[in-house]
Image (spheres, helix red, strand yellow):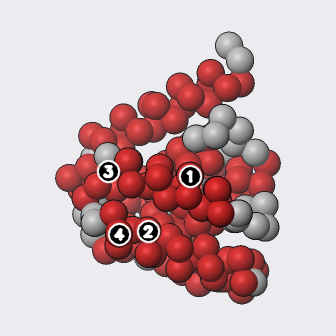
Amino acid sequence: MALWDRIKDSTRLMQGQLNQKKTELKSGAFRDASMAMCALVAAADGSVDASERQRVASLIATNEVLQNFPADDLRQRFNKYVDQLTADFEFGKVGVMQDIGKTKKKPTEARAVVQIGIIIGGADGNFDANERRVVREVCFALDIPPTEFDV
């Protein structure tokens, strides 16, 4: 099986798992952490151009689990996090990781945040080394073994 097919299968499986837990994923902490994770994955290579920002915003708007929240609110939060990361990645990452960390005490939410990051990272068929690295860092911050998600 080609790498692209494995990525697609993995993201489909994760999306299915998230959909099963949709009713549990309605907190403000999950909303913020999810948008922070999306921004972190988008900015993993150090920049986010307009087309990438638009592509990720589109994925956010069409994600079934994230439809628990108003799309405009999610877009604004995502853009705020992207702006923080593109202004100064290392400094912005501190704030982003703090918001992601708010899900640490709720394992279902924490795992869902990681899954959303993987889905966003793999959406273009190339879950690259930078994206894997930031997802791995998030796993460590949330006390989730990265091997659980094969990152």
Report the label total.
4
- The reply to whether dot 4 and dot 2 touch (C-beta < 8 Å) is yes
Which comes before the other along the chain, label 3 or label 2? Answer: 3
- Residue at disc 1, secondary structure: helix
Question: Who comes first in sequence, dot 2 or dot 1?
Answer: 1
Residue 56 in view in this figure: yes
Residue 147 seen = no
* Rendered-image quadrant of the C terminus: top right
Say which mark, if any, is on residue 55.
1
Measuring from the top left, give residue 66's x and y in whole percent: 34, 56
Mark 3 and mark 2 in contact? Answer it, CB < 8 Å: no
Q: What kind of residue is marked 4?
A: Asp
Number of the front mark, 4 or 3 = 4
**Residue at the spot of label 4:** 72
Amino acid tagged 3: Val
Disc 3 designates what residue? 65
Secondary structure state at the residue bearing disc 2:
helix
Element assignment for label 3? helix
Dot 4 and dot 1 residues touching (CB under 8 Å): no
